[in-house]
Image (cartoon, grey):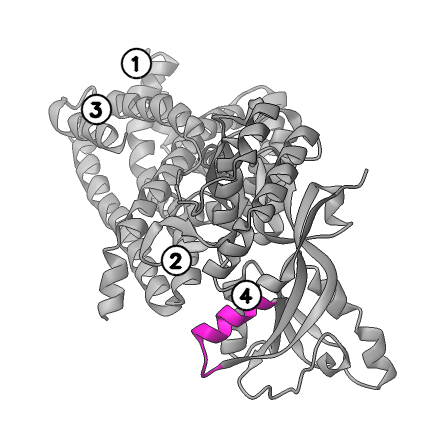
Amino acid sequence: MFKRLFDDIRGVRTDRGLGGRWRNVALGGAYVMALGMPAALLMPALLIPSNAQAAPPAACQALQAKYPALKGKTLVNAINPHTPGYEALDPKDPSKYIGFDIDLGEAIGECLGFTLTYKAVTFAALLTTLSSGQADIVISDIYATEERAKAADFITYSKVFDGVLVAKGNPKKITGINTSMCGATAAENTGYVEVPLIQNLAADCKKEGKAEPSILLFDNNANCIQAILAGRADTYVNDVNTVDQAVKAYPDKLEKATAVTLPYSVGIAVPKNKPEFRDAVLAALIELQKAGIETELLKKWSLDAGFLEEPRILTTN
Amino acid sequence: MELLLHYLSLPYLLQGIEFTLAVTALGLGGGLILGLVLAAMQLSRFAALAAFARGYTIIFRGTPLILQMVFAYDALPHIGLKLSAIGAAGLALAANEAPFIAEMLRAGVLGVDRGQVSAGQALGMTPSLLMRRIIAPQAIRTMIPAFGNETVSALKNSSLASVISVQELTLRSTQLASSTFDFFSIFFASGLIYLGLTSAVSDGLPWYSLRYGRLFSST
């Protein structure tokens, strides 16, 4: 498209006489609009294929027969690809996304007969992208909560363990989401479940005569980690595996203070108005777990396999 | 330094330029068309049209572009208008650029010496002939520097499309930084690429200005 576009403009500039120059520039503009606009409007989401690892279990054939509408489809998976281990660009080949969530999604797709393309959005926009119909599914290490279940249905598959990331030596002696955070600055992503938990510490801090914790809000994990490295924040509380990956990347500068259990599960979000799709994903996930594929993937990405739980649906009206 | 050169020549980042240019072209092209309509409304004798143009300007000049982009991408589908990411970004940028371009066009037209218009009328020129032969050639020449500024600002504003998943230079840079942790080299490289693009636009336009200025003055 660009080559033709520029060729056209070059032709306008060099070939024509003065009288027709502006008319032709205008025609060139109209050409840009006529060809460019619809082409761009119709341009599909960027296709970035990735490879699922294990072969689908035999039971998947039965599921494909039960849910034939999904077979052969290409669905859009909205992700916040800033979490190495779960979803991030492949540093060796940045045209691909890699990670546990990517493999899990591809495995579910393989089981049910659909393929996935990816749409990279901010964490806070994951569910809005889903509910506006710009994406069909969200597999992006998102915690399923009652609040979020108002916007989407969730299929949960893993318990939530959070890690508390701090600067090396833990200078503020933070021991979890408790009054040790009073007066400290936490970096979090907009929309994270940890945000209200930290905000709720204000009353306890006041009781102890300490300053309340402050929160810096960012759009992705990488920015939160950088906030600690730059000394802007004292801590970042998030999924323990993400915290471990950050410590692995900066072993001299960061450490994990502790791990805490939160009363949530990690889930896959699907639109509320597609119960059949939700049930199909649930069934596929159960089969993958039964066949040990999920455990295999967790091992492949060095994520702790002890957190698995039986898939179930979280939905509210 | 080696890393910087690596990222400056990385096809993944360079492909992001295409999306950056596509959003910019849609924004400027659409903005020019919408701006022409708005300017015509503002210059019109009908009060209702002028009032509509004023209302449009208040809304789109008075709200942030990032909000307009998110609105075009995430809110419009709720009323049945689902655009692709690049379409939504182009639409929002065009809608946002239009009032600024309209103002440029209006000022350019009004800036042409009144006496020349009167002289043309005295010679029996029709309004469309007047516009083509007298007003437009002079107005366009004075508008070129302002249009250059608008192009540079549209190009930089296209980076906001990163929040609605357009795979342009900024989104690609942030994703790459997240997976490689090479924040410094990557953002430095993408800064240099943006600088190259904006320089090409702002250095290119004075040349156009001179060229067309000379050509028009010779007619």
Query: How many numbered discs?
Result: 4
Q: Amino acid at mark 2?
A: Leu
Give the residues in magenta: A240-253
Depth-wise, is mark 2 or mark 3 nearer the camera?
2
The front one of A210 and A246 is A246
Q: What label sits on residue A21 in the rendered view? A: 3
Q: What label sits on residue A242 in the rendered view? A: 4
Q: Are marks 2 and 1 on the same chain?
A: yes
Kindly indicate whether the residue at mark 1 contacts the one at mark 4 (C-beta within 8 angstroms).
no
Name the residue at 63% across, 53% down.
A142
The front one of A155 and B172 is A155
B59 in magenta: no
Q: Quadrant of residue A180?
A: bottom right
Q: Which residue is mark 2?
A: B176
- The quarter of the picture where the N terminus of chain A appears is top left
SS of the residue at dot 4?
helix
SS of the residue at dot 1?
loop
Q: Are marks 4 and 3 on the same chain?
A: yes
> Dot 3, crowdedness within 10 Å: few (<14), some or many (≥20)?
some
